[in-house]
Image (spheres, coloured by chain):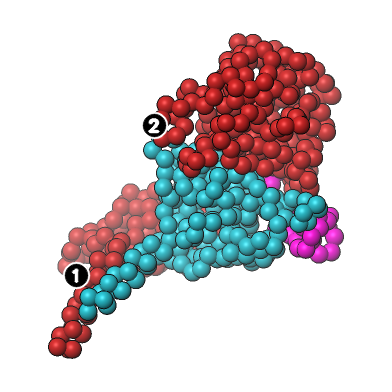
Chain colours: A red, B cyan
Amino acid sequence: MKIFKALCFIWLSMILISCGGGGGQSIDKIVPVDTPVTPPVGLAVAGFNQLLDITWKRVDGASSYSIYFASEPNVNKDNYMTLSDGNVISGVASNAFSIAPLENGKTYYLSITAVNLKEESSNSYEVSVTPNYMSILNSEVNDTGQTGCFDGYYNMIDCGDEGALIGGDSSYGRDALMAQIKKLGDGPESFDFTKLDIHGGELPYESTSHSCVKDNVTGLLWEIKKNDEQLHHYQALYSYYSTDKKFIGDLPFFGIKNGGVCEGSDCDTESFINAVNDEIYCGYTDWRVPTVRELNTFNHVRSHSIDNVLYEEGIIRFDIQHEYSNTTWTSTVPFDALKPMFMFYGGRFASMDFFKIHNTRLVRGSYLGANDD
Amino acid sequence: MTKLSVVLYLLLIFVNFNSIAADCSSYLDRYVPTSRFVIHHNGTFTDKVTGLMWSRCFAGMIWVNDKCEGDWLESNLEESIKQANHSVYAGFTDWRIPNTNEILTIIEYSCYPAVNDDLIKFLPPTTHIQVWTNTFVDDEATWGVGAYMVSLNYGAGLNEWGATSEMFSLHVRGGDKI
């Protein structure tokens, strides 16, 4: 009986293990191993930062593939060792592979063979690619303005000082490339802003009468608050209301209508947006509440997050300040329906519920290839 | 035997659920659509818009046979930065921790945890996945220097956090070094 139990256990284990194994490689059509293999076709190659991706069509009967490459043309299995950067990657089981690290700006030539137990095919036709690097200067990613380094204990110090921990924000990105940056406008550290008047006309950087600020890095246009007891008043507070979003599952709940304290419109975000669009503010009628990731791009982090340098430099003329609320809405709706809305205060983002009122800084434009609204 | 098989079965469930997958909202659009990225075959992916290359595994793990293997690194700010400085992953040695703007480009607010798990694999099996940024913040009144972090489970906002706290890291490369 004991033996039976043991056998049964082993048998059951095998079943369970085979059930739990998951995955599994796809098996090529079974072809006798002595059948010759043909060289792969359908090669496609793409270059990235010190990396290339190559794919090809599977070859019937192949058990693996070999990728021959060099930085000179006409590479094959016989000559690759004599060519610059000549190399081979053998035993590749799938029909896709990434090769890294490679040198950016250098052109690599590749040719593939199919291999089975009997033989290796002749070389495929050749493809070439040049891995390249997209500089942060060409992307929409703003930097943070941070220039100091952490000492690993409790202090911010100059990055050149002894004990500075390298690898922080100030070592990378636009702020680290200040010498190479050509700004369309001006701004602290690597920030690059152009001020606009209420009709969208450009103003000098020194102007204090601007209504909007264009971020020349992200492409976003920001509303600037005013101290005029009117529509753009910096102490206005709005409830969140939006009829174009479903917030909590499929419940028809759009927020709180006209629940704030403000001038020039009903005091909810949608009414405020409509009023600003009616003005054709700075030349645009597609204003909206920014997302978390957009609002963070308009925040200069020095050491204390609440010391917003953009405010001190007069880019943001009247900061959103109120004894009750130094906060502003974002349109980002997180998955967690219990905390359906983000707010922003002094560089932090946190979840908040609808039953609060906050200021709102509007934005227009798209970020990261999408209109975030 | 029944007991043994139950134990074995539970063990298998544990193995299979050792890392968790993201649960995504059916009514919100994705903030981080997979179509914005190229997924490479060595455990990395490239953002076609920002040009940044990211690790598909959390810091501490390596990519083997289309999976993340090893243990999730969960450590204080200094150790996390040093580990990134010394990291060798997918053949690259220039990995680092992202800054606040960079991490927000891959936070998927419409999922829980807040990542696109087509891209980032093998999430730590905890309800407190907090990841460091390398953007420091000095709050002398409370805990001195720390950094912003993102909680992938609760709210996914940026928060200031003390340097001695232990958190996970995601690694990025590119973005130009001095």
Residue at 60% in and 49% down: B150
Is residue A135 something one can see in this rendering? Answer: no
Coordinates of residue A188 in the picture (x, y in percent):
80, 37
What chain does badge 2 belong to?
A
Is residue B27 something one can see in this rendering? Answer: yes
What chain does badge 1 belong to?
A
Residue at 50% in and 56% down: B127
Tell me if residue A37 comes above or below residue A191 in the rendering: below
Evaluate whether label 2 is on the same chain as label 1: yes
- Magenta stretch: dominant secondary structure: loop
Residue at 39% in and 31% down: A250
Q: Is residue A72 magenta?
A: no
Q: Is residue A173 magenta?
A: yes
Q: Magenta part of the protein: which range?
A: A150-174
Tell me if residue A333 comes above or below residue B134 in the rendering: above
Instruction: Say which amino acid is labelled 1.
Output: Asp
User: In the figure, is residue A110 to the left or right of A196?
Assistant: left
Q: Which mark is residue A209?
A: none
Q: Secondary structure at mark 2?
A: loop
Quadrant of the rendered structure where residue A5 is? bottom left
Tell me if residue A262 comes above or below residue A247 in the rendering: above
- Residue with the mark numbered 2: A250
Q: Quadrant of the N terminus of chain A?
A: bottom left
Coordinates of residue A368 in the picture (x, y in percent):
56, 36
Residue at 69% in and 15% down: A263
Q: Secondary structure at mark 1?
A: loop
Pointer 2 or 1: first along the chain: 1
- Between B112 and A126, the one nearer to me in the picture: B112
- Between A42 and B174, the one nearer to me in the picture: B174
Instruction: Say which amino acid is labelled 2.
Output: Asp
- Residue with the mark numbered 1: A34
